[in-house]
Image (cartoon, rainbow, N blue to C red):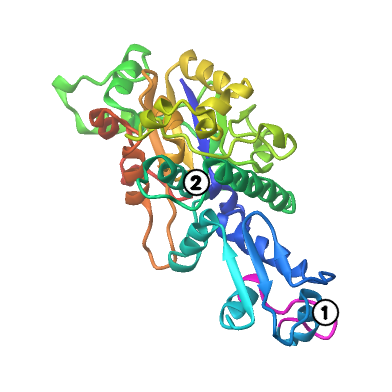
Amino acid sequence: MNRIVLIGNGFDMAHGLKTSYMDFINWYWDKRIDAFAGNTTKVSEDRLCKLTIKDGTNVSCWNVFTFEQSYFRDILGNRTCSGHEVIKELEKHPEVFSIDYCPFFRRIMESFETKRWVDIENDYYYMLKKVIGEVSPIDYTIEDLNEQMGFLQEKLVEYLRTIEVPEAIGDINKALTDYIYIEDLSIEGKELAKTMGIIEFDTNTFDDNRYIAEHSSGLSPERTMLLCFNYTETAHIYELYGGLILNFIHGELNHPEHIIFGYGDELDKDYQDILDRNDNELLKNVKSVKYLETRNYHMMLDFLMAAPFQVLIMGHSCGNSDRTLLNSVFEHENCVSIKPFYHKWEDGSDNYLELVQNISRNFTNMRLFRDRVVNKEQCKTM
């Protein structure tokens, strides 16, 4: 019996890395504000937004603004507040400054400000569907949207390259190499374990002590694949433990040409409409198409077909942006267990329920969902 481990951004965050989209957006604003130095014009512009000093004010250019506004610089010229805080200050003075966001980035910033949570890939898919769904004219094209998505991907790679590789965490390594416990298996998985001679329990002659003893036993996974949805190098630090197989399904930072950043929800009711448009620009960032640029996806399929397997979920939210791939894993005939590791906060609350709600959206067969997902009492925190 094998094991496949889905590694998402929460895995990096458990190692203390600032890899959330919120962290990325904060970094982006820091870089934008730092770029004011040396800018002798009244305009600071990129593909996401345009910052303008209005005519008739006492600020002649962004370089002057950088040195005159001492509230965000110390005596040595170092920034004393975040770039986003500077932007918020500019917004307080519309008589002097104007900030023009592209529609895509405006939606991202609305989530940043109101929900304190950002999902760039889902925002992209929402904006893409508006292109084909709106009756009234909208103020952007799919070409505009793809250009802005490409710019964000470039900046995200630039940001993630500034993050150092952390050290391995003992508890995570232990979980990666732990037994596959009989009690975590689905009904089909338990029947398979019987045929393999791992358990001999007969439900017709129920004996509580024997049941507990047999179901708390386990077996070592023959092979384990780390299916990494992150671009960072964090998963590599566990390569030395137990001969784990690494599959960077969405690409790595050292091969940015193969990075996959977009949407992957072919189960969505609007996806067929996108296909029917016969416009390849609409499919430019669809994940299932991008998977064909490398052998990683087929390597995953070969692993799924090789033997029955357990799924561990470590830091992946199981959101809709990966629903096509996750459905292929979760409903695969060889899947015998799906065990999520959930996050618990200091106040005692946790996200187990939210996580399994997300997992459920990746199923078309809810009977399989209820049977294969391990209950909270048998799961652990990340």
What residue range appears in magenta?
72-85
Overall secondary structure of the magenta stretch?
loop
User: Above or below — where is 113 with respect to 188?
Assistant: below
Q: Nearer the viewer, residue 107 or 57?
A: 57
Label whose residue precedes the other's in the sequence (1 or 2) = 1
Q: Is 130 included in the stretch rendered in magenta?
A: no
Left or right of 263? Residue 53 is right
At label 2, counting other C-alpha atoms closer than 10 Å, the crowd grade (few under 14, some 14-19, many 20 or more) is: many
Residue type at mark 1 is: Gly
Name the residue at 52% across, 19% down. 303
At label 1, counting other C-alpha atoms closer than 10 Å, the crowd grade (few under 14, some 14-19, many 20 or more) is: few
Q: Secondary structure at mark 1?
A: loop
User: Above or below — where is 184 with respect to 37?
Assistant: above
Name the residue at 54% across, 25% down. 289
Residue type at mark 2 is: Tyr
Q: Nearer the viewer, residue 358 or 372?
A: 358
Foreground disc of the pair 1, 2:
2
Q: Secondary structure at mark 2?
A: helix
Which residue does the numbered mark 2 point to in the structure image? 124
Viewer can see residue 200: yes
The percent coordinates of residue 182 (x first, y second) are: 35, 28
Which residue does the numbered mark 1 point to in the structure image? 77
* Identity of the residue furthest to the left in this view: 204
The percent coordinates of residue 261 (x first, y second) are: 58, 39
The percent coordinates of residue 16 (x first, y second) are: 62, 57
The part of the image, by quadrant, that contains residue 39 is bottom right
Q: Is 80 included in the stretch rendered in magenta?
A: yes
